[in-house]
Image (spheres, rainbow, N blue to C red):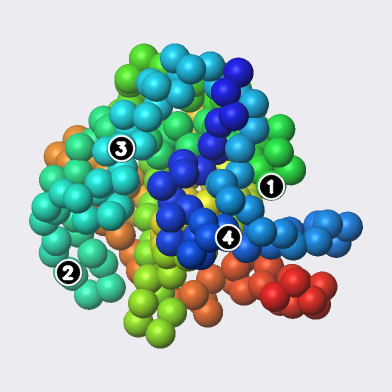
Amino acid sequence: MKNSHIIPEFIYSSLYDEKHRFHEISDDVKKKNKMSQKGIREKLLCSECEQHLSKYERYASLVLNGGFSLSVRNEGRLVHLGNIDYQQFKLFALSVLWRAGVSNLSVFSQVKLGPHEEKLRVMVLNDNPGTEYQYPFILSPIIHENKVQEALIVAPTWTRLENHYAYRFVFGGIAWVFVVSGHKAPKFIIDASINREDELTMIPWELSNLRFITDMAQELAQQDKL
């Protein structure tokens, strides 16, 4: 087994200092904060599986870091993006969700996929992104003082969206909200998620309005970890 990243290494680039270290803040009262030189990893995948996922990571890295020319259309608060490959980008996102679900690390302990774990594994292994109705996700850039907060990674948490289980990740300056359900997700989620026309809709949010992040920050501050 390889030392595998759950959140891909390229996501951590904005966190590193001049010595290639980043500040890892623990929400465990028994653990101290520490400096790390690599993103969070564990013995998880074989070399072949790592190679299989790397093609999706490379594509997502280009999309998220401006390596592709995307079409952009603003409509009020909404940002509509085009020219994003449905298969590659969705499989990147689902691979992160699946890895978090099978991880033994405590930071990913809230991601419990149940029967969806095997379904996601097979989809990713077979390069099958599924239909637009299967495992849709919303992307919300996180804004503070008019800047996207790229240097922010938060432990994923679960929530409910109209009686569906959903998992919230924060990385790459974006809140990723995945709906994991055997039933059709609400229309507003499917409409915003990436579609087979290679389009998706982002909904930017001010950091101070994201309660699950601000509540966590307050708890860490009470532990003198911020």
Q: Quadrant of residue 128?
A: top left
> Quick one: label 4 or label 2, which is nearer the N terminus?
4
| Mark 3 or 1, nearer chain start | 3
- How far is the residue under mark 4 from the one under mark 2? 34 Å
- Find out whether the residues at labels 1 and 2 contact each other: C-beta distance under 8 Å: no
Around disc 4, counting alpha carbons within 10 Å, would you say few (fewer than 14), some (14 to 19), or many (20 or more)?
Answer: many
Q: How far is mark 1 from mark 2, CA to CA?
A: 35 Å
Q: The N terminus lies in which quarter of the figure?
A: top right
The residue labelled by disc 1 is 107
Residue 134: horizontal and vertical position, in percent? 39, 32
Count of numbered tags: 4
* As drawn, 83 above or below 71: above
Whole-angstrom CA distance, mark 1 to mark 4, is 16 Å
Give me the residue at 36% from left, 37% from top. 57
Discs 2, 3 touching: Cβ within 8 Å: no
Residue that lies at the very extreme toward the right in this rendered image: 30
Judging by the rendered image, the residue that carries numbered circle 3 is: 58
Badge 4 vs badge 2, beta-carbon distance below 8 Å: no
Label 2 amino acid? Asn
Answer above or below: position of 37 versus 94: below
Q: Amino acid at mark 3?
A: Arg
In terms of sequence position, does the residue under pointer 2 or pointer 3 come before the other?
3
C-alpha gap between disc 3 and disc 4: 22 Å
Secondary structure at badge 2 equals strand
Measured from the top left, where is residue 130 in percent x and y?
Answer: 33, 25
